[in-house]
Image: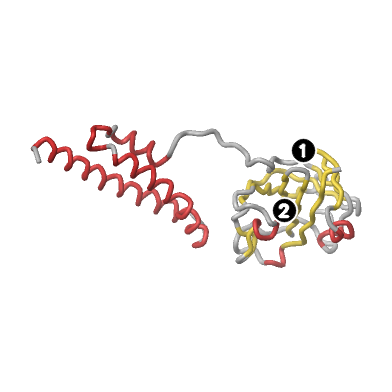
Amino acid sequence: MTAATARRSQTAMKRLAGALSFVCLVLFLIAIEQRHTVAAWEALRDEAAPAARRLAAWVAGLPSGAGDGFEGLKTAIRGEDRPLAAVAGSAAILRGEYGPADESTREAAGSLTVIGAELRFENGDSLRTRPLRIAFGRESFAPRQTFAARLDAPADAQIELRAVVPSGRGQGHVPLNLCGGGPAGVAALLHRGSRVDLMLFRPGFVIDGETPPSALCGVWSFAAR
């Protein structure tokens, strides 16, 4: 082994050690930002493997002179920049008329009319909503219960969480037949093709893995007319 080859090998090993330390730090920060242990594991599971593969590919080229410093390391771990896009079939509902997709929805809600941020049901219930956040199917809405399992949807399906707002200034949440005569605080909507799935949650809860099952008013399915 020549002196030049030895120096290149030592440089590669130093870069590898630094890269691995950086990856460990990134993954640790990802983990501690999660509120729950399960969420932390999901983050590590989803992020570690792709990052490790990109890192390995980058390091493999170092001895041949392909090392491009810290910028190359950041690019390897992060991956290529791509614009964020909604998953196909999960776009937010803007307007339309939907009929009940099953008998239980027919009996409880009837048809659904969506006008902007307002949801109107044939049974007389009406909701005004505002955007809250986008949840993925793999996320939990109660202990050991995920949106994907409850709605029979993919783990990466995008569920639009919308806060239910009072119908007028100084007014509280209106009672709903769909919530047993009580109000709703959050609506979860999954729009896939011509089908819409709706989950309603009672007010006063953050929808996550610790939300009590009793917070869920029910789940209904509708199909576009």
- Display colour scheme: secondary structure
Q: Give the residue drawn at x 85%, y 52%.
A: 100
How many other residues sit within 10 Å of disc 1, few (<14), some (14-19) or many (≥20)? few
Say whether residue 90 is left or right of residue 26. right
Say whether residue 211 is left or right of residue 99. left
Between 155 and 169, the one lying in front of the other is: 155
Residue 115's x, y, as percent? Answer: 82, 39
Residue at disc 1, secondary structure? loop
Residue at disc 2, secondary structure? strand
How many other residues sit within 10 Å of disc 2, few (<14), some (14-19) or many (≥20)? many
Q: Give the residue drawn at x 64%, y 48%.
A: 157
Residue 206's x, y, as percent? Answer: 64, 57
- According to the image, label 2 marks what residue? 186
Q: Who comes first in sequence, dot 1 or dot 2?
A: 1
Give the mark toward the camera: 1 or 2. Answer: 1
- According to the image, label 1 marks what residue? 94
Q: Image quadrant for the N terminus? A: top left
Between 174 and 12, the one lying in front of the other is: 12
Q: Give the residue drawn at x 73%, y 45%.
A: 191
Q: CA distance from mark 1 to mark 2?
A: 17 Å
Q: Are marks 1 and 2 in contact (CB under 8 Å)?
A: no
Using the rendered view, name the quadrant where residue 207 is placed: bottom right
Amino acid at pointer 1? Leu
Using the rendered view, name the quadrant where residue 61 is placed: top left
Say whether residue 51 is left or right of residue 194. left
Q: Image quadrant for the C terminus? A: top right
Image position of 13 with respect to 184: above or below: above
Between 73 and 210, the one lying in front of the other is: 73
Amino acid at pointer 2? Val
